[in-house]
Image (spheres, rainbow, N blue to C red):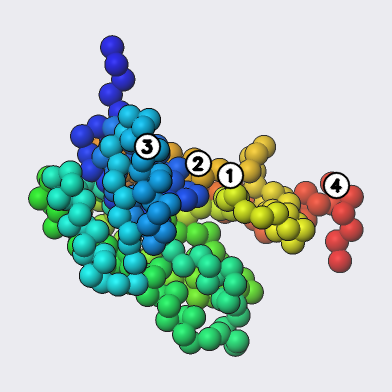
Amino acid sequence: MSRRGRLEGKVAIVTGGAGGIGAATCALFCAEGAKVVIADLAGEAAESLASELRRAGGEARAFRLDLDDPKSVQDMVAFAVDQFGALHILDNNAAAAHLAANVDGPLETMDPDVWDETMRVNLRGPMLAMKAAIPHLRAAGGGAIVNILSNSYAGGDMGPTAYASSKGGLAVLTKYVATQHGQEGVRCNAISPGLIPIAAKATPAREAYRQRMRDHELTPRSGLPEDIAHAACFLASDEAGFINGQVLHVDGGVSAHLSPFVDGVRLKRGVQLT
């Protein structure tokens, strides 16, 4: 007997779907039977991935999405419904990560333009996508929204302030959407990833940061994009039908321990604490 995929018969949109966590999510959604729209500002990369997934037997289409443009967001949802006839899943994965990595920082030195662009992409963008998607999710008899956060929202740090604040806003918005539309069969949950190394040019600073983060993780390996994809697939599936308005931390246990834990780990390794 052939295995029925957990998302069989469902139509999904994944924003920021052309690379990293988004690409892993698109691949898994297709493998689990969903018809997927890969929405990304990198249109050529989205088309390349869609072609790859179709060759593997999946059903995928690419859409060039500008999350900063309300019309582009509306057109994305219309495209999904036009291509596949319905909409059941919205995975809000896209974010202005380049701002967080390069120009975001402490509040005192914050460029208001960086703050505004971060909020437009990371918070207003998912809001617009949910606003456009909810009528179609309701019309399909119910559906699931999965918002991708970041552990940065859950506690203070020296930066990036705008990015973390935008993800905190999205965490609150997740609960409001769940509250306002849960009785209509529209569930809205979020995933808060820990450090998920993405293929990038290795630098001493990046590798040192990864090692510091490994001290916080309670697992024998680092996180992978597929870890977030599997969590998203579960929350999007009917198996999670009684889960609504929640934030699932997929971070290797980083958010599970008290702050002195890491000092103990480093002392055991003979690291002198100053």
For label 1, the residue is 223
Q: Who is closer to the viewer here, 209 or 79?
A: 79
Q: Amino acid at mark 2?
A: Asp
For label 3, the residue is 53
For the residues labelled 2 and 1, the Cα–Cα distance comes to: 7 Å
Residue 157 position, x and y percent, is 61, 71
Callout 1 secondary element: loop
Q: Between label 4 and label 3, give the one nearer the viewer.
A: 3
Q: Indicate which disc residue 62 carries.
A: none
Callout 4 secondary element: loop
Q: Indicate which disc residue 227 carries.
A: 2
Q: Quadrant of the N terminus?
A: top left
Q: Which is more N-terminal, label 1 or label 3?
A: 3
Q: Is residue 154 left or right of residue 186?
A: right
Q: Amino acid at mark 4?
A: Arg
For the residues labelled 2 and 3, the Cα–Cα distance comes to: 19 Å
How many residues crowd around disc 2 within 10 Å: few (fewer than 14), some, or many (20 or more)?
Answer: some
Residue 205 position, x and y percent, is 74, 61
How many residues crowd around disc 4 within 10 Å: few (fewer than 14), some, or many (20 or more)?
Answer: few
- Seen in the picture, residue 239 relative to 40 is either above or below; the reply is above
The residue at the point 47 percent across, 50 percent down is: 19
Residue 237 position, x and y percent, is 29, 38
Q: Which is more N-terminal, label 4 or label 2?
A: 2
For label 4, the residue is 269
